[in-house]
Image (tube, rainbow, N blue to C red):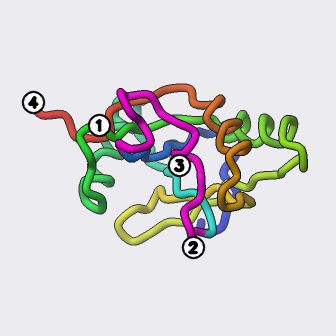
Amino acid sequence: MKGDNIPDRHNIARYCRPTHAPGGQIQATAFMLRAGEGSLSVNWLEFLNCLSRDSEIAALRNIYSAKLGVGAHARIGVLNVGEVRNKVLAESPDRRNLEVLHEPQFEDPSHSGIHNLKEDDELIAELILETVRESYPARKLVS
């Protein structure tokens, strides 16, 4: 439901633009708020109700291609909610308590957001980057 906390045991994915993933390597800048953003957009993987990580990534590629211009070198970074929250809480100077909330959109029902971030917060972005578990190409694969 909209506004629900995503459980710590669940996983989220972040679309990382090509400029934030040069050479396929996701950078901390992918986890920084842009001007005017209230939260960092992510997708709740378990909400997709898929049978495997491959099917979750395929579903995300469909969502992204419908609403974004997906660059050839864009990436999807997969993170565990609890790892992100615990790392930032333990290692940020202000003991930042991030919230990861479900924020469904019409065209993207798994859409969610990481809250309690600030613009230009490089340290928090670096801590989040350290929790990336997996990385995949964001563009749909041509068969």
Mark 2 vs 3, N-terminal side: 2
Mark 1 vs 4, N-terminal side: 1
Label 1 to label 4, Cα distance in Å? 18 Å
Q: What secondary structure is found at the residue carrying circle 4?
A: loop
Mark 1 vs 2, N-terminal side: 2
Identify the residue under disc 1. Answer: 73
Q: What residue is drawn where x is 49% and y is 59%? A: 111
Q: Position of residue 135 (x, y in %)?
A: 44, 29
Classify residue 40 by image quadrant: bottom right
Task: Provide the residue span drawn in magenta.
Answer: 18-37
Identify the residue under disc 4. Answer: 143
What amino acid does circle 3 point to? Trp
Classify residue 102 by image quadrant: bottom right
Identify the residue under disc 3. Answer: 44
Q: Are marks 1 and 4 in contact (CB under 8 Å)?
A: no
Left of 57 or right of it: where is 83? right
Q: Are marks 3 and 4 in contact (CB under 8 Å)?
A: no
- Count of numbered circles in the view: 4
On-image quarter of the N terminus: bottom right
Left of 1 or right of it: where is 123? right
Label 1 to label 2, Cα distance in Å? 25 Å
On-image quarter of the C terminus: top left
Asked whether 93 or 100 is in front, the reply is 93
